[in-house]
């Protein structure tokens, strides 16, 4: 009986122990999502100003981590207002019909050290693709920072149709870079 | 001293005349196009040709300071001679300042220039939207000024040829 009570206490205590080290409060003001691509051999970059993120990550149990990102595509900042307008339009993101891009994590692998690999599904413009996102995690006290980057092909998501569909001016490969800061729950 | 320009000076003059005319036409034309792959293509071509013009004018200035051009005819009033020198000085100054302003504008706008898509030209300025817009304005005003100076340049050359009937125009032509 004593044993049983002990087990019960442990089982009850465990979730608290786990959540103490779980990083799950995303601080969007200290987070950013960037992209880079090539335009006629010239490296260009931009970012998304608005996105929502939900995240649960316990360094002690990385494989149970979960993350969901919703990126407001109309918040794109290419560096030129004319281009922002163009990219929100029908041939590119078509933000009227598809306002957000979503990433939902699946399996998470720990690669050793502070490196992880997050498999997941990325949906943009109604098209879903499997992606694998390498990321590092650095804890700084009660906050942790996730850094990573991965490459998508805009053609896979019909980003840039019609006159833009060829890759001679705007390349197919788009590199997505992110830095997400999350605090651990109290 | 012969009363003509060196073949090198003549070649540079006419080569740049063609190139600059093309750059002006393309510049004013592309500016008002709606964003399209074509427009981006034109912008790149314009920047490549503009950097080429800048390098050519450096060569040309090098040639100019080492090879004295033929003197203006003594029949020309002193005031007109000054005007001619001032006009030529303006042309050189603008041929330097216009591509420089284009380069600085591209840097400030965050669109690096990669010469012929191969050779990256360093960005002299950090990305800064206000500065980029200002430099675009500077590039445009310098170009409008350039057009005005070119028109008087051509007007003066024609006046020498048709009214004064001297050899000012013909001595810049290939077989003089
Ligand atoms: C002698 C050489 C050049 C000439 C004669 C020239 C001429 C022009 C002209 C006439 C315009 C249109 C201005 C307007 O309507 O706003 C223009 C625009 C432009 N030029 Fe140049 N240009 C030269 C060199 C360059 C260089 C070297 C670069 C960059 C490396 C450059 C970049 C641009 C850009 C980006 C625009 C578009 C500005 C805008 O859309 O606001 N240009 N140029």
Image (cartoon, rainbow, N blue to C red):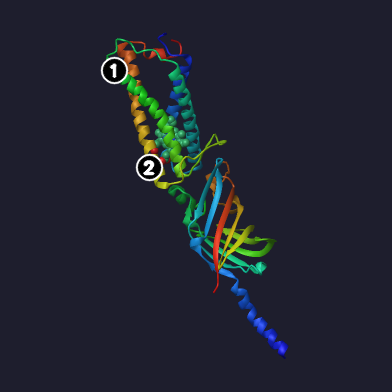
Is the residue marked by circle 1 packed among few (<14), some (14-19), or many (20+) residues within 10 Å?
Answer: few
Q: Chain of mark 2?
A: B
Q: CA distance from mark 1 to mark 2?
A: 35 Å
Query: From the viewer's perspective, is A71 left or right of A110?
Result: left
Which badge, 1 or 2, is on the more N-terminal residue?
Answer: 1
**How many numbered badges does the structure rendering display?**
2
Residue B84: x percent and y percent?
33, 19
View quadrant of ligand 1: top left
Residue nearest the viewer, comparing B69 with A81: B69
Residue A61: x percent and y percent?
66, 69
Label 1 with label 2: CB-CB less than 8 Å = no
Marker disc for residue B80 = 1
Residue B147: x percent and y percent?
36, 29
Q: Is residue B144 above or below residue A102?
A: above
**Residue found at x 72% / y 87%:** A3
Q: Name the image quarter holding the C terminus of chain B.
A: top left
Residue at numbered disc 2: B134
Is label 2 in a helix, a strand or a loop?
Answer: helix
Is label 1 in a helix, a strand or a loop?
Answer: helix
**Residue found at x 56% / y 44%:** A38
Is the residue marked by circle 2 packed among few (<14), some (14-19), or many (20+) residues within 10 Å?
Answer: few
Q: Is residue B32 above or below residue A96?
A: above
Residue nearest the viewer, comparing B34 with B14: B14
**Residue found at x 67% / y 67%:** A63
């Amino acid at each position: 009986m004593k044993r049983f009570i002990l087990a019960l206490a442990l089982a009850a205590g465990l979730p608290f122990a786990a959540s103490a080290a779980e990083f799950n409060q995303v601080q969007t003001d200290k987070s950013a999502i960037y992209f880079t691509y090539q335009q006629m051999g010239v490296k260009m970059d931009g970012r998304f100003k608005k996105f929502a993120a939900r995240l649960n990550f316990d360094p002690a149990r990385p494989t149970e981590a979960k993350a969901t990102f919703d990126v407001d595509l109309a918040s794109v900042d290419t560096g030129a207002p004319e281009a922002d307008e163009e990219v929100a339009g029908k041939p590119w993101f078509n933000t009227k019909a598809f306002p957000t891009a979503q990433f939902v994590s699946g399996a998470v692998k720990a690669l050793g050290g502070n490196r992880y690999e997050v498999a997941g599904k990325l949906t943009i413009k109604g098209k879903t693709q499997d992606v694998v996102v390498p990321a590092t995690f650095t804890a700084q006290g009660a906050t942790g920072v996730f850094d990573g980057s991965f490459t998508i092909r805009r053609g896979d998501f019909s980003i840039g149709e019609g006159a833009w569909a060829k890759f001679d001016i705007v390349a197919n490969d788009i590199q997505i870079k992110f830095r997400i800061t999350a605090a651990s729950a109290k | 001293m012969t009363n003509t320009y060196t073949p090198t000076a003549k070649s540079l003059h006419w080569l740049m005349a063609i190139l600059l005319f093309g750059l002006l036409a393309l510049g004013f034309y592309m500016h008002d196009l709606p964003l399209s792959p074509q427009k981006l293509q034109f912008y790149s071509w314009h920047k490549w040709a503009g950097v080429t013009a800048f390098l050519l004018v450096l060569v040309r200035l090098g040639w100019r300071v080492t090879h004295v051009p033929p003197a203006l005819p003594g029949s020309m009033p002193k005031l007109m001679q000054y005007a001619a020198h001032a006009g030529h000085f303006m042309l050189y100054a603008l041929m330097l300042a216009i591509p420089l302003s284009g380069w600085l504008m591209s840097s400030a706008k965050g669109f690096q220039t990669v010469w012929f898509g191969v050779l990256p030209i360093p960005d002299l300025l950090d990305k800064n939207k206000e500065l980029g817009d200002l430099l675009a304005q500077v590039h445009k005003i310098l170009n409008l000024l350039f057009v005005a100076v070119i028109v008087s340049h051509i007007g003066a050359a024609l006046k020498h040829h048709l009214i004064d009937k001297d050899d000012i125009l013909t001595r810049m032509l290939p077989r003089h």
